Image (cartoon, coloured by chain):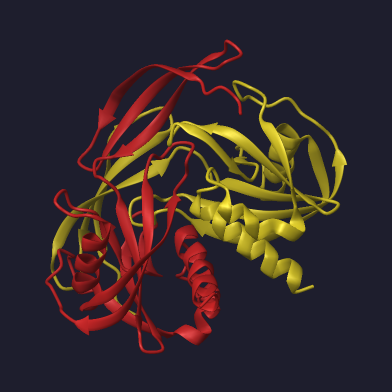
Chain colours: A red, B yellow
């Protein structure tokens, strides 16, 4: 294993409501010194949930401000300060699709662009659902989309299903369900 | 299809060397007005390449400043101003693993966190490789890792293989190769 670069200094160079941009001064083990930027979300992480209701997967279509169009994907959101992973998963699911789950299974952590983002997201499988809607904080109600679990791979053909973590999730869910 | 929110105004609220953070004022079709932030990388997109050399996949282990550890993944990088997708793929491959490809196949675009990131990455399959190293701009040489293509799914068990787009890529590559 290679020796990690030494972190000489980290400083916040600019910030917004959602983000801190940090500059990190690094000394690599070969003596090279560089400064890299990274983006540190101002929250303690996120969850993405795959809710299974009977033979259907419950998805949402939501306006995605990063790409400026509607995106089809899994319910997801930020973990609140007073929550653990599974509590956040249940709350987000209640807010976005109107169900809670008796059975929540952690599948995997996934990172984003690890070169410049520190964020980490947990993928949670949710089963044994019961209706338990909670009001969310979205500017408009999310469109809930039922997708036949047996056709989960056909999501790859939907033009508004583009997120790498959503694509990864469909394969991870399929793999988990087949393993049973 | 739901009517997209109207973009009332976009403004750069802060910027760094790599990023612009924009605030976007939106009016949703139900009348709600909100301001969301998004992160706009200051480049024209990125490529991720899956180079296949014989029965091996060529990966790299590189220091990832976002998560502050080494990450195992595919060669990747930013598209330079004077390049198209495939030119960028060949250049990045030459810099990071020392090979160019006679056969480059576009597999798919993948977005990151579409809620707050505008970035988009193209996944490219690279075959019929020939040695053609180019010097890169990394602070230390990247570690090149050969991985048996037949065991591609075992990458999921590596603790430093965490990126959602890398996980998505292994399934997309497998699917493409099986389809032949």
The image shows residue A107, relative to residue A42, as above or below, that is below
Quadrant of the rendering where the N terminus of chain B is positioned: bottom left
The tally of labels here is 0
Q: Residue B89's spot in the image, x, y percent?
A: 69, 45
Q: Residue B51's spot in the image, x, y percent?
A: 75, 49
The reply to whether residue B82 is in sight is: no
The reply to whether residue B22 is in sight is: yes
Q: Residue furthest front?
A: A180
Quadrant of the rendering where the C terminus of chain B is positioned: bottom right
Q: Residue A25's spot in the image, x, y percent?
A: 42, 17
Q: Residue furthest bottom?
A: A54
* Viewer-proximal residue among B60 and B13: B60
Q: Residue B138's spot in the image, x, y percent?
A: 61, 25
- The structure residue drawn at horizontal position 76% and vertical position 60%, both measured from the top left corner, is B150
* Viewer-proximal residue among B179 and B158: B158
Find residue B68 and report its image quarter: top left
- The structure residue drawn at horizontal position 68% and vertical position 62%, both measured from the top left corner, is B173
Find residue B140 and report its image quarter: top right
- The structure residue drawn at horizontal position 54% and vertical position 69%, both measured from the top left corner, is A171
| Left or right: A84, with B151 as reference point | left
The image shows residue B60, relative to residue B177, as above or below, that is above
- The structure residue drawn at horizontal position 80% and vertical position 39%, both measured from the top left corner, is B99
Q: Residue furthest top?
A: A31
* Viewer-proximal residue among A117 and B15: A117
Find residue A15 and report its image quarter: top left
């Amino acid at each position: 294993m290679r020796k990690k670069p030494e972190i000489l200094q980290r400083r916040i160079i600019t910030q917004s409501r959602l983000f801190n941009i940090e500059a990190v001064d690094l000394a690599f083990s070969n003596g090279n010194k560089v400064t890299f930027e990274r983006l540190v979300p101002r929250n303690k992480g996120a969850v993405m949930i795959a809710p299974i209701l009977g033979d259907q997967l419950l998805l949402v279509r939501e306006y995605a401000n990063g790409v400026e169009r509607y995106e089809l994907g899994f319910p997801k959101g930020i973990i609140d300060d007073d929550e653990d992973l599974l509590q956040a998963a249940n709350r987000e699911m209640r807010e976005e699709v109107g169900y809670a789950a008796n059975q929540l299974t952690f599948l995997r952590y996934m990172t984003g662009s690890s070169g410049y983002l520190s964020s980490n997201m947990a993928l949670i499988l949710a089963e044994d659902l019961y209706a338990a809607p909670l009001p969310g904080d979205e500017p408009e109600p999310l469109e809930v989309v039922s997708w036949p679990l047996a056709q989960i791979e056909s999501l790859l053909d939907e033009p508004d299903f583009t997120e790498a973590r959503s694509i990864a999730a469909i394969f991870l869910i399929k793999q988990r369900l087949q393993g049973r």
